Image (spheres, rainbow, N blue to C red):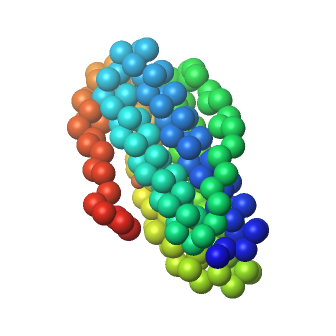
Amino acid sequence: MPSKKIEEALNEQVNAELYSAYLYLSMEAYFESVNLPGFANWMRAQTQEELVHAMKIYDFVNERGGRVILKQIEAPQTEWASPLAAFEAAYKHEQKVTGLINELVNLAIEEKDDATNSFLQWFVTEQAEEESSSNEVVQKLKTAGGAPDGQFLIDRELGQRVFTPPTAKGA
Ligand SMILES: [Fe+2]
Ligand SMILES: [Fe+2]
């Protein structure tokens, strides 16, 4: 059974992951509205990943005998000035989430909760990947410098991202 503090912090993280899904879904809608289906596809895959993150924590709380409490999800921003602005916001958001995961790890250490600490290590690795994949698109867009043909090529490339659902537990 997790301590009350850990249980509450994990519940907060479920909310943060659901907010991430909501944010990327909002970015998908923005990209659809400006006729960039490849960018929209990338955001759809990212949304699905975030839902997996939320469910991983949800399941973990239940498995440990804790109680999942769902709270209101904040409304995300709906418009961005450019594809670059949206991806910069995504990168910044992932840096924030990394901070939240690190705080959770520190709390697990303080509370001597080895099971939670070990569970969270998957997220530590995942956050490094999340930061690098959003930043990679930021760098591509910066290189393209807003040139329409550059943006078109990036859109085509991002259109190829495929979401892979996790296989069984732990993937
Ligand atoms: Fe996440
Ligand atoms: Fe990921």
Is residue 127 among what the camera can see?
A: no
Is residue 17 among what the camera can see?
A: yes
Q: Quadrant of the C terminus?
A: bottom left
Q: Is residue 17 above or below residue 109?
A: above
Residue 119 in percent (x, y) is at 51, 73
Name which residue lies at 32% across and 57% down.
Answer: 166
Of 165 and 3, the residue lying toward us: 3
Name which residue lies at 27% across and 33% down.
Answer: 159
Of 124 and 155, the residue lying toward us: 124
Q: Is residue 17 left or right of residue 40?
A: right
Q: Quadrant of the N terminus?
A: bottom right
Q: Is residue 88 above or below residue 120?
A: above
Residue 15 in percent (x, y) is at 63, 47
Name which residue lies at 48% across and 53% down.
Answer: 55
Q: Is residue 11 left or right of residue 4?
A: left
Residue 81 in percent (x, y) is at 56, 21
Q: Is residue 153 left or right of residue 94?
A: left
Of 130 and 140, the residue lying toward us: 130
Name which residue lies at 41% across and 35% down.
Answer: 43
Instruction: Report the number of numbered marks.
Output: 0
In which quadrant of the rendered view does residue 5 lie?
A: bottom right
Residue 59 in percent (x, y) is at 50, 61
In which quadrant of the rendered view does residue 93 lie?
A: top right
